[in-house]
Amino acid sequence: MGRWEPGGRERLQLAALDLFLENGFEQTTVADIALRAELTERTFYRHFADKREVIFGGQEVLVDAFTGAIAAAPDGASARDLAEAGVAGAEQFFDEERRPWSRRRQIVIDADPALRERESLKMNTLAEAVAVALRERGIGDPVAELAADAAISVFRMAFARWVAPDETRSLGDIQRELFAAQRALA
Amino acid sequence: MGRWEPGGRERLQLAALDLFLENGFEQTTVADIALRAELTERTFYRHFADKREVIFGGQEVLVDAFTGAIAAAPDGASARDLAEAGVAGAEQFFDEERRPWSRRRQIVIDADPALRERESLKMNTLAEAVAVALRERGIGDPVAELAADAAISVFRMAFARWVAPDETRSLGDIQRELFAAQRALA
DNA sequence: AGGGTTGATGTCAGGGTGTGACATCACGGT
DNA sequence: ACCGTGATGTCACACCCTGACATCAACCCT
């Protein structure tokens, strides 16, 4: 298939994360990344729609984890149950093995406004996907949207805590705690 | 102060909205906007940090409406009450007079991914500002964040309905209806 | 084994975004 | 009348991203 070494996409992601950590997102040019990955700038843009996307690869897998868990939830589940099931689907995705990488990645994102902006878009997309999955399970509007937003709110807060420096609890534990707090709110 | 005509910033915003509606966001260059506003491209960037920001001016006023209403809420209000008070503060901001302009603006935003991305960031920023205002009223974490997210969720959905083509209800009415649905969720 | 196909990569050119540095001009104060 | 102040204009430039075309390796088919 490829011309020389395989895994061009992965090499670009690795090189990008390293360079962003070393020099910052803005200071790193796409040419820098391509050079370290032994590819050209043009090839970078064949793998990623723009410079930021190199950090956000694999979002589709996460969306599938959410929507798959919602589709697999037992019959008779309430909107809230379904939304929680979707969030629970993320637990397997973000296991302990993935944690160090997630932490490095988050350091880069938190340090740059443009990347934080892209992250907020991804969360929005995720919420919309969850709302669609809820509608497919028969939940009507506006309940589907409200439940989806509530679920993503918990996921986002839980994830932020999960990647925080001294945190040792699993993502699932944090999520369950936050869901309890959310229920107590009403 | 200015060299020729005053109100350069406003002329740029007007010109931009018109051009975006006519030709789309991507097809419109900053040079086009500056030309119609009888200014230069460089001056555009003195007023707005980037091309997208010309559409999102005045966000600070909205943030103030939220945080001001939270600060002014009566003593003894719960986290949920405070968050709802903040959202209610947006009602005066988006009155009937502003509605046509908001609709035109939303058409432009909905039509372009880059603008939708910026919009999601603005909502994030708003949620964070609300969370800060709640903490200043003595609400602790994670309740402050959860309540802020819930409030912004309602505001966002209500606003989307408010600017929808055939909607006639006021923003406040839509918000109250959605808050009721949100309470019923739990 | 040889030739054609396919798909990823390389090369080149160019428009658009955003910024730094410096010049210019109108206005207000003195 | 002079001088500062602040907004604007001019110029140069790095970087982002894309279209068009060329190139090369792996695979398929006979």
Image (cartoon, coloured by chain):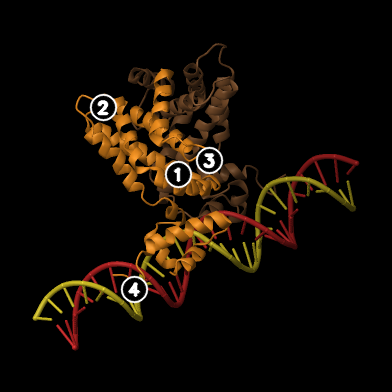
Chain colours: A orange, B brown, C red, D yellow
Q: Is residue A124 above or below residue A1?
A: above
Q: Mark 2 points at which residue?
A: A140
Q: What residue type is labelled 2?
A: Gly
Q: Which of marks 4 and 2 is in front?
A: 4
Q: Which of marks 3 and 4 is in front?
A: 3
Q: Which of marks 2 and 3 is in front?
A: 3
Q: Name the residue under label 3.
A: A165
> Looking at the rendering, which quadrant does residue A170 occupy?
top left
Chain of the residue that carries numbered disc 1 in the rendered image: A
State the SS at label 2.
loop
Chain of the residue that carries numbered disc 3 in the rendered image: A
Q: What residue type is labelled 4?
A: Arg
Q: Which amino acid does label 3 sit on?
A: Pro
User: If you read the primary sequence from the N terminus, does the residue marked by circle 3 or circle 1 appear first?
Assistant: 1
**Marks 1 and 2 belong to one chain:** yes
Separation (CA) of disc 2 from disc 3: 40 Å
Q: Where is residue A90 in the image (x, y as percent from the top left)?
A: 34, 39
Q: Position of residue A14 (x, y in %)?
A: 45, 58
User: If you read the primary sequence from the N terminus, does the residue marked by circle 3 or circle 4 appear first?
Assistant: 4
Q: Do the residues labelled 3 and 4 touch (CB within 8 Å)?
A: no
Separation (CA) of disc 3 from disc 4: 41 Å
Crowding around mark 3 (Cα neighbors within 10 Å: few <14, some 14 to 19, many 20+) is: few
Q: Mark 1 points at which residue?
A: A119
User: If you read the primary sequence from the N terminus, does the residue marked by circle 1 or circle 2 appear first?
Assistant: 1
**Marks 3 and 4 belong to one chain:** yes
Crowding around mark 1 (Cα neighbors within 10 Å: few <14, some 14 to 19, many 20+) is: many
User: If you read the primary sequence from the N terminus, does the residue marked by circle 4 or circle 1 appear first?
Assistant: 4
Separation (CA) of disc 3 from disc 1: 20 Å
Q: Nearer the viewer, mark 3 or mark 1?
A: 3
Q: Are marks 3 and 1 in contact (CB under 8 Å)?
A: no
